[in-house]
Amino acid sequence: MPSILVAYATKHGTTREVAEVIASELRARGLSATLRAADDVQDLRAFDAVVLDAYDAVVLGGPLYHGHWHREASRFLMRHRRALEALPLAVFALDPACAPVPNAAERACARGQLEGALRKAPWLTPVDTQLSGAALDPSRLHSRFNRMPDTDWRDWGAVRRWAAALPAALEIEPAPASTQIPAAPAAIPLDVLTARAG
Ligand SMILES: Cc1cc2nc3c(=O)[nH]c(=O)nc-3n(C[C@H](O)[C@H](O)[C@H](O)COP(=O)(O)O)c2cc1C
């Protein structure tokens, strides 16, 4: 079964939630998707051969903070350069959350920030890059920022559509339906079992 690593960097957890949805959409399409924090994937370079065997593609996501992609997302690109040169890669970023509604100028700015981060890894050619909206819980922020509006304009429909298009973009064939693992059957209630036994 084709296998995809979905790696994410996060400070407050909203990117991880997007990565979870992406991984579950990929699984629903007959792919094996492994969800990992980007900084947990420490040994990709040391185990290149294993990783290249283990994964057919990588999806990497991280939020933008103060004009920069999350440090662990950028580090992931640098740390795993050798492996990533040989694997199809798609990236996503969570972008401004300070406007009450999505704002085209801010989104263009965020896209520039993501592209700036990717330019530092010129050896990469991501098959796709995506901005996934953002979320912000001001109560978690330090006092300078905690008057910002509570916002969540992650567009889950767009996230799911992007994930659905990933196998084609990454040139990964989903497993044929006949080889997909069927969903576990629902448990038979105890009273039904008892009635059958009786
Ligand atoms: C202090 C602060 C600075 C931010 N700076 C940026 C930024 O420069 N560009 C941007 O597009 N989004 C920015 N954002 C929005 C975050 O990327 C967004 O809230 C994201 O959902 C956070 O992801 P996380 O929960 O995974 O850490 C900022 C948010 C905060 C709280």
Image: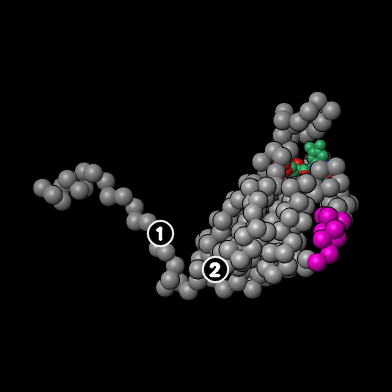
The location of residue 150, given as percent across then percent down, is 74, 34
Q: Residues within 10 Å of mark 2 (few under 14, many from 20)?
A: some
Tag 2: residue type? Answer: Pro
Which is more foreground, mark 2 or mark 1?
Answer: 2
Confirm whether the magenta stretch covers residue 69. Answer: no
Q: Check disc 1 and report the residue beneath it.
A: 183
Q: Going from the N terminus, do you reach mark 2 or mark 1 first? A: 2
Instruction: Describe the element under mark 2 as helix, strand or loop.
Output: loop
Numbered label attached to residue 95:
none
Q: Give the residue at mark 2.
A: 2
- Which residue is found at the position 74% from the left and 61% from the top? 81
Query: How many other residues sit within 10 Å of disc 1, few (<14), some (14-19) or many (≥20)?
Result: few
Magenta span of residues: 114-123
Q: Is residue 94 visible?
A: no
Q: Please name the residue shown 42% across and 64% down the image.
A: 181
Q: Is residue 158 above or below residue 192?
A: below
Numbered circles on residues, count? 2
